[in-house]
Image: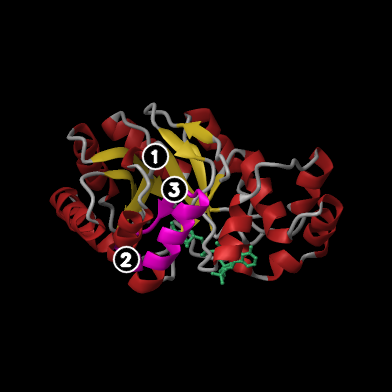
Amino acid sequence: MIDIPVHTLNDGTKLPALGLGTWPMDDAQAEEAVAGALGLGYRLIDTATNYRNESGVGRGVARGGVPREELVVTTKLPGRHHGYEETLASFEESRRRLGLDHVDLYLIHWPLPRVGRYVDSWRAMIKLRAEGLVRSIGVSNFTPEHIERLEKETGVLPSVNQIELHPLFPQDELRAFHAAKGIVTESWSPLGRGSALLQDPAVVQVSEALGVTPAQVVLRWHVQLGAVPVPKSADPGRQGANLDVFGFDLGPAQMGVIADRAHERLGGDPETHEEF
Ligand SMILES: NC(=O)c1ccc[n+]([C@@H]2O[C@H](COP(=O)([O-])OP(=O)(O)OC[C@H]3O[C@@H](n4cnc5c(N)ncnc54)[C@H](OP(=O)(O)O)[C@@H]3O)[C@@H](O)[C@H]2O)c1
C-alpha cells in the first residue's frame, strides 16, 4: 500500500498530502468509492453538506475498517446555514449523517460576502473545535480579505483554505498568502475536472518523458507546490493511479511548462458565487 506523506497544520494536526473528492457522487456511489479508496491507502476524504452524500461517505468509512485516528474526514458548511446557531445545528446534522463522533476537518464552503455572516459561522467553528467535536477548522473559496477579517475579529486563522487550483488556474498570489500565514492550500478540481488539461500537449509530453499518466503529472505538480489535491474518481483503477504520485519528481522546467498558459477559472468567483 502507498505510504502518503503528511502536512502538519497550524493547529498541530496532520493532513495527508492527497485525498479523495466525492462530488458529484450520490450516497451509493460515495459508499463504494470511499470504501474502495480506503483499501487502496487513501486517508483523506472530502465531502460537503451540499454534495448530499455524507450518509454514503459515512457508510464507506465504516466499511473501510481503517483505524479512526488514521482518517481525515472533511465536510463543509453550506451557505444556507451561515450564522452562529445555524452553524452549530448544521454541524450536528452533518455529524449524524456521517455517523462519526467527531469530524476531522470542517470548512466553510463559500464565504458569501453579500450575506456577510461568515465570521459568525467561524466563531461557532472555533467552539466546535474547543469542544473536540471538530479536530481542525478551515475555509474554502476564501480570499485574503476574508481570511484577514477572520483573523482580525476572532484571532484564529484557518488551518486550510480549499480553493480552485490546477495548471489552468495556478493561484500564485493566494498560495503565497497562505504560505505567509501558515495555512495549507487544498486544491479542488485538481485535474481541471478531467477536461482538456489531461490531453494538453505540454502535460502529455512530460508524462511520456517520465513514463507516468497525464493525471499523475498534474497531481504531482500539486504535491510539489505544497498543495493538497482532492481528485475525484469513482473508478478503482484511476483512484489507485491518482494516489501513486509519490515515487517520481518533476524538474523545475517541467513544473514551469505545465502551468505556462493563459489562466482561467472553471468554477465560481468567491466574491460573487452564491451557493446555499
Ligand atoms: N470547495 C469547493 O467549492 C469545491 C468545488 C468543486 C469540487 N470540490 C471538491 O474537489 C473534488 C475534485 O474536484 P472535481 O471533481 O470538480 O474535479 P477533478 O477531481 O479535477 O476531476 C474529476 C473528473 O476527472 C476524472 N478523473 C479522475 N481521475 C482521472 C484520471 N486519472 N484520468 C482521467 N480522468 C480522471 C473523473 O472521472 P472518474 O470518476 O470516471 O474517474 C471526473 O470526471 C470534488 O470531488 C470535491 O470533493 C470542492
- The amino acid marked with disc number 3 is Leu
Which residue corresponds to the image point at 63% horizontal and 46% vertical from the top-left? 222
Residue 112 visible in the shown view = no
Number of callouts in the render?
3
* Residue drawn at point x = 45 percent, y = 57 percent: 270
Q: Which residues are magenta?
A: 31-54
Pointer 3 local density, CA inside 10 Å: few below 14, some 14–19, many at least 20: many
| Crowd band around label 1 with a 10 angstrom C-alpha radius: few (<14), some (14–19), many (20+) | few
Q: Amino acid at mark 1?
A: Glu
Mark 2 and mark 3: span between their CA atoms? Answer: 15 Å
Instruction: Tell me the quarter of the picture where residue 194 sits.
Output: bottom right
Quarter of the figure that contains the C terminus? bottom left
For mark 2, what is the residue? 56
Question: Residue 146, image x and y in percent?
Answer: 39, 44
For the residue marked with disc 2, what is the amino acid? Answer: Gly
Question: Mark 1 — residue?
Answer: 70
Q: CA distance from mark 3 to mark 1?
A: 9 Å
Disc 3 is placed on an element classified as: strand
Mark number displayed over residue 231: none
Near-viewer residue (18 or 165): 18
User: Left or right: where does residue 57 sit relative to residue 181?
Assistant: left
